[in-house]
């Protein structure tokens, strides 16, 4: 069931979409009236209807044809005393919700962009392939190439862990019910999925939780994670200025719809992901282009990015 803010968002979106046809209907009525009773037409109505119709067409073209094929890189940085001095910058790339169907120019840009970033770690937080409809051979090629870029860790959404393991050639470590240590140039890291249970913080190592849905951020906070990475919401996939996501499909609603959050001592980032929800969901993105997140951690202030 949609939360009240999501219902409100849907009503706002519906009202905005209905403005152009409503104005067009008023213009038609005004034209009929001018013919029947010989009154002058209200030209301002025609101008308003034309402007509204043009805006609607441009927004629809952007949502269907342009934004879903874009790729943006969101860079964030933070200082952590748990980063060893000899580590320098620890770079993490986070992607989610690829919803892979087949090889496209976008999937190739994803691989090139991540390769160019030269990350120390790669996180993939679920919904990697499109449910029920994807080219399996091309998916194996994409995932194996992706996970060859850097040590790769992930969690599942509706994905099947063994399928992802086979498709990646064992290069993608699934963390749903597991934890794994990692050492990057002297920095000790504990990576884990919240379903593994228990606290993962201590000994001065960097604790990172991977979850698919922001519904699990609370569990990561309770377990003392330094960082939590999530996807699932697609940032709403359709966003409105000053309002944000229309629908998030998460129990937390708009609380963790997209972006960086500080909850207690835990930093969390919910990405807007890359792909599109499977049909019959509208295959659109508006004010919400696909995203790769690049986090740079250092033990001293890196300055603004």
Image (spheres, helix red, strand yellow):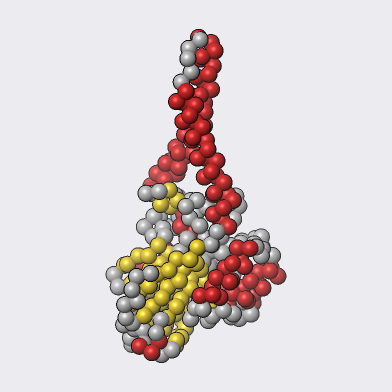
Q: What residue is at 33 percent from the left and 73 percent from the top?
A: 303
Is residue 206 at least partly visible in the picture? yes
Q: Is residue 33 above or below residue 273?
A: above
Q: Residue furthest top?
A: 37
Judge by depth and name the residue closer to the eye, 258 or 164.
258
Q: Position of residue 135 (x, y in %)?
A: 69, 65
Is residue 281 at least partly visible in the picture? no
Q: Quadrant of residue 8?
A: top left
Judge by depth and name the residue closer to the eye, 93 or 135.
93
Q: Quadrant of the C terminus?
A: bottom left
Q: Quadrant of residue 131?
A: bottom right
Q: How many marks?
A: 0
Q: Is 158 situated left or right of 265 in this image? A: right
Q: Position of residue 301 (x, y in %)?
A: 31, 77
Q: What residue is at 57 percent from the left and 46 percent from the top?
A: 61
Q: Position of residue 152 (x, y in %)?
A: 53, 78
Q: Is residue 37 above or below residue 148?
A: above
Q: Is residue 252 above or below residue 211?
A: above
Q: What residue is at 64 percent from the left and 74 percent from the top?
A: 167
Q: Position of residue 150 (x, y in %)?
A: 54, 80
Q: Is 79 situated left or right of 120 in this image? A: left
Q: What residue is at 50 percent from the left and 57 percent from the top?
A: 289
Q: Is residue 227 above or below residue 257?
A: below
């Amino acid at each position: 069931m949609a939360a009240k803010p999501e219902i409100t968002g849907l009503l706002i979106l519906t009202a905005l979409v209905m403005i152009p046809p409503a104005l067009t209907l008023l213009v038609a009525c005004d034209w009929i009236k001018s013919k029947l009773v010989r009154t002058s037409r209200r030209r301002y109505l025609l101008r308003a209807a034309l402007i509204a119709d043009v805006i609607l067409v441009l927004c629809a073209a952007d949502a269907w044809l342009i934004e879903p094929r874009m790729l943006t890189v969101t860079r964030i940085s933070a200082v952590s005393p748990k980063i060893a001095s000899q580590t320098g910058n620890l770079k993490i790339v986070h992607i989610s919700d690829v919803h892979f169907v087949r090889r496209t120019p976008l999937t190739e840009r994803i691989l090139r962009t991540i390769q160019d970033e030269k990350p120390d770690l790669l996180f993939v937080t679920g919904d990697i392939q499109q449910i029920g409809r994807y080219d399996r051979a091309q998916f194996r090629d994409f995932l194996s190439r992706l996970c060859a870029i850097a040590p790769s860790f992930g969690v599942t959404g509706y994905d099947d862990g063994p399928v992802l393991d086979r498709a990646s050639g064992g290069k993608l470590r699934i963390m749903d019910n597991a934890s794994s240590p990692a050492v990057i140039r002297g920095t000790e890291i504990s990576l884990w999925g919240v379903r593994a249970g228990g606290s993962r913080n201590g000994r001065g190592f960097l604790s990172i939780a991977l979850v698919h849905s922001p519904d699990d951020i609370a569990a990561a906070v309770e377990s003392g994670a330094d960082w939590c990475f999530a996807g699932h919401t697609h940032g709403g996939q359709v966003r409105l200025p000053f309002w944000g996501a229309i629908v998030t499909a998460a129990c937390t609603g708009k609380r963790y719809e997209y972006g960086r959050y500080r909850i207690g001592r835990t930093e969390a980032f919910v990405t807007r992901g890359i792909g599109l929800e499977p049909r019959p969901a509208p295959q659109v993105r508006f004010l919400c282009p696909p995203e790769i997140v690049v986090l740079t951690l250092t033990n001293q202030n890196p300055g603004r990015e």
